[in-house]
Amino acid sequence: MEFLEKYNYWIENEYFDEETKKELKSITDEKEIEDRFYADLTFGTAGLRGKIGAGTNRMNKYTISLATQGLAQVIVNRGKEAMDRGVAIAFDVRHFSDKFAEIAAQVLAANGVKVYLFEGIRPTPELSYTIRRLNTISGIVVTASHNPRDYNGYKVYWEDGSQILDDVAGEILSEINKIQDFSEIKLMDLNEAIERKYINYVGKEIDDEYIEKVKNLALNEDIDKGIKIVYTPLNGTGNKPVRRVLKERGFNNIIVVPEQENPDPDFTTVGYPNPEDVKAFNYAVKLGKEKEADILIATDPDCDRVACMVKNDNEEYVFINGNKTGALLINYILTTRNRDNTIPKDGVIVKSIVTGDLSKAIAESYGVETIETLTGFKHICGKANEFDKTKEHTFIFGYEESIGYVYDTIVRDKDAVISSMLIAEMAAFYKKHGKTLLDELEAIYKQYGYYDEKLISIVLEGLEGSRRIGRMMDSFRESPIDKIEDMKLIKVIDYLNDETGNPKSNVLKYYFDDGSWYAIRPSGTEPKIKIYIYSKGGNKEEAESKIQSIESTVISRIDSIK
């Protein structure tokens, strides 16, 4: 069915409500209609993510109910035990998140699947914890993480507490594809579902257990708990859990950015609520200078990512990116556990293939192996799930350069509640010893070498943008750049055809003879192509120069592909 046929179907079919039809009829630009209907919002291993609005290529109650009917059928296919174990559902602060969560619960209930629905907003990592705590077969979190305000998303988890992998995603997609018409989707009245105990609300008891488990991951008590920290939840779900865990750990000097304290689905003060972007810290920087804070911490709207800025000798705040924060955390964890003689002999660090190698060098010095996976915590924490069965390794820490980290295994996803606590503790530990995180980072460079990196994201929206990204990947795959300055290409990994044991993925990685490398991949959740550039030099200037050379050469190729 062509996009105009789909558009007319939605307008004319009595199944769709009048509000939806009114929204569609108000569109005057045919390009907008095409963008909403040229494809169905794809269900993949990341679930669903897209702009909010009417249409098959948008996040709305119909696409949510369709995906949930597919999930429900997969659970029903597993029998009554799986249906009775049920599904845990959490949601964030975004527009319609609460309604989408309710609709998912109603569809599951109509299919005879039990639901545990949080009564209010919760951080994504708490959903992961809840799945394992309640022994549910699956979990859903309605969130678009750090995407702009006009987006929402729907992530599906499985019984191990991690996001679904390709096998389960394939099952769900197969069931979705069997649905010929939206009218086939089952839906139970919300009050009836509650009355019949299909939908059960959860909250405080789970919160209390989760916070207690997080606090038990603390590594040091001999720290400066008076360290002055400015925290911003960026109007998201982190406000209560992060502040609570820091308060209960004894930190007595936490200052919250007031304009970004409470939920705001429009993210009025920040626009793009991604703490990976230093602009998200504007309000925190202003307040930090006013209060003379030592460190600034920001979590994204669903509180699974965290970033920090640290005051330098010139009283300015310096952003510490994901690779550097990950290296600092690994250094802190392993140094402390080495002191306490608690590093497991079979311990491992797990990172993504596009994350830097400084942490690997640190881990090696403590006899700890580093394992690489595809991008995404479904793969990183998938290793923790694998080790549960094989007993081959002990999972210590997992992270990726896009400011996602998890310590230990109580949560099987990136967790900004745990990570915020550890960043605060780490900064307080070094402060007590007369150092900042910047001082410690410099000490790490002196010991392990100077590592530098740069991430370039190019946004290409819509159908034509998607096609152009495809042409870019084809060009690099078919004709690699064999030399940049004095750096010669010595190895290529095409993760669609590699032999590393990872699942197939559209990622290309190029290694040069001096240890520098870059990788290129389309984003799995946003209309972007990403280029990751890494170098290692004898000093800062040498490493930076290599980054610039690789960047100019690769971007020149990118720009030439129309």
Image (cartoon, rainbow, N blue to C red):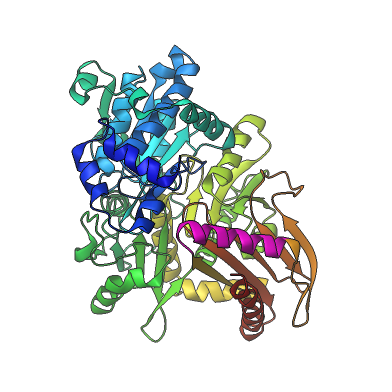
Q: How many marks?
A: 0
Q: Is residue 113 left or right of residue 393?
A: left
> Which residue lies at the image location 65% right of the left edge and 74% below the top edge?
557
| Residue 381 picture location, percent across and down | 55, 43
Q: Residue at x 55, y 64 (%)?
A: 530
Vertical position of residue 345 compared to residue 173: above or below: below
The magenta stretch is: 460-477
Between 296 and 430, the residue placed more toward the observer is 296
For the C terminus, the quadrant is bottom right
Task: Name which quarter of the figure residue 213 lies in.
Answer: top left
- The residue lying toward the viewer, choosing from 524 and 360, is 524
Would residue 534 appear left or right of 429 to someone viewing this image?
A: right
Asked where in the image residue 327 lies, by quadrant, the reply is bottom right
- Which of the 4 image quarters holds residue 103? top left
Q: Position of residue 301 (x, y in %)?
A: 33, 54
Task: Tell me, yes or no, if residue 208 can be seen here.
Answer: no
Residue 499 spot, x, y in % from top left: 77, 47
